[in-house]
Amino acid sequence: MRPTCRWGLPISLIRLEGPDARRFLHGQSSQAIELAQPGSCLPTCLISPTARMRGLALACIDASGIDLLVVAGDGDTIRTQLDRVLFPADKVKLGPVDSATLWQWQGEPPNHEADLLRPGVDLGSGAGAAVWLQRAGQGLPGWLSDLQDLEPGAIEANRLRHGLPAAPAELNDETNPFELGLAPWVSLNKGCYVGQETLAKLATYDGVKQQLRHWRSDTPVAPGTSLSTSAGERAGLITSAQGCEGLALVRRSCLEHATLLAAETPLQVSVPLGFVAPPVGAGGQG
């Protein structure tokens, strides 16, 4: 199927240059980056020492360093955090935060298009879909510029249905990657890194206490609204909303409920299209 429409995601681009760039980012994010080959595009979570969410990024590896594409979260804050743990002995030059756009589309790109990124995770157009990076001052390729833009409301609705977390609604000090369906963004067998111990325990002991879900209703519901079951059990919290649909964090004991209540409003609850179930029993791999 030929591409039919496009949408752009504004992102922050941080350049890490130098022979230690892969080793450094390997230790500061959730993905196995140190041994990645040039040309790789790896999804990774930027997390706190207790595995709380700071941002989502793609690490695009080349021969001299890494382009860190922050697709969710504040780029300036993430750069500051990286700079804070960069030692003088690290052979890494941390560049400024630049603006860029990550383009997606519905349908298949031309077969000859060679400059596509394939992160292998769902950014809103499917788990195997490619994306195209537009750097500041760069024009779009002809096949992409000819497509019609999605309306902003349709872009947000697509994010909600695929379950792509946003800051601060889903990316905050209350969530970890496995709760948000981000298992492919995490390596559990790469060794020590910031937040590794917490994530390993969550996987080994099946410790995820809530999960992200998509919801629909007949009337609008505001973010921050508490959820309950029909029996009155506390079930979770609305995190994002656009009219009559959105995202919610649902407690583990209530995940099997197809309907939950926001006050008196029934919500139809389902697994987002891009959500990947948390790993169970994998955290001890070494």
Image (tube, rainbow, N blue to C red):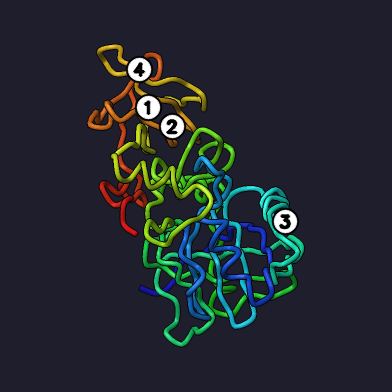
Q: Earlier in the sequence, mark 4 or mark 3?
A: 3
Amino acid on which disc 2 is placed: Cys
Residues packed near mark 1 inside 10 Å, few (<14), some (14 to 19) or many (20 plus): few
Q: Determine which quarter of the picture holds residue 145.
A: bottom right
Measured as percent of width and height from the top left, residue 7 is found at 54, 60
Amino acid on which disc 1 is placed: Asp
Residue at 51 percent of width and 46 percent of height: 156
Measured as percent of width and height from the top left, residue 58 is found at 54, 63
Residues packed near mark 3 inside 10 Å, few (<14), some (14 to 19) or many (20 plus): few
Amino acid on which disc 3 is placed: Asp
Q: Residue 265 vs residue 54: left or right?
A: left
Residue bearing the label numbered 3:
83
Q: Nearer the viewer, residue 163 or 56?
A: 56
Q: Determine which quarter of the picture holds residue 106.
A: bottom left
Residue at 38 percent of width and 47 percent of height: 200
Measured as percent of width and height from the top left, residue 5 is found at 49, 64
Q: Earlier in the sequence, mark 1 or mark 4?
A: 1
Q: Determine which quarter of the picture holds residue 265.
A: top left
Q: CA distance from mark 1 to mark 4?
A: 21 Å
Q: CA distance from mark 2 to mark 1?
A: 6 Å
Residue at 54 percent of width and 47 percent of height: 47
Q: Which mark is residue 178?
A: none
Q: Residue 103 vs residue 202: left or right?
A: right
Residue bearing the label numbered 2:
244
Q: Earlier in the sequence, mark 3 or mark 2?
A: 3
Residue bearing the label numbered 1:
218
Q: Nearer the viewer, residue 1 or 123?
A: 123
Give the number of the mark in front: 1 or 4: 4
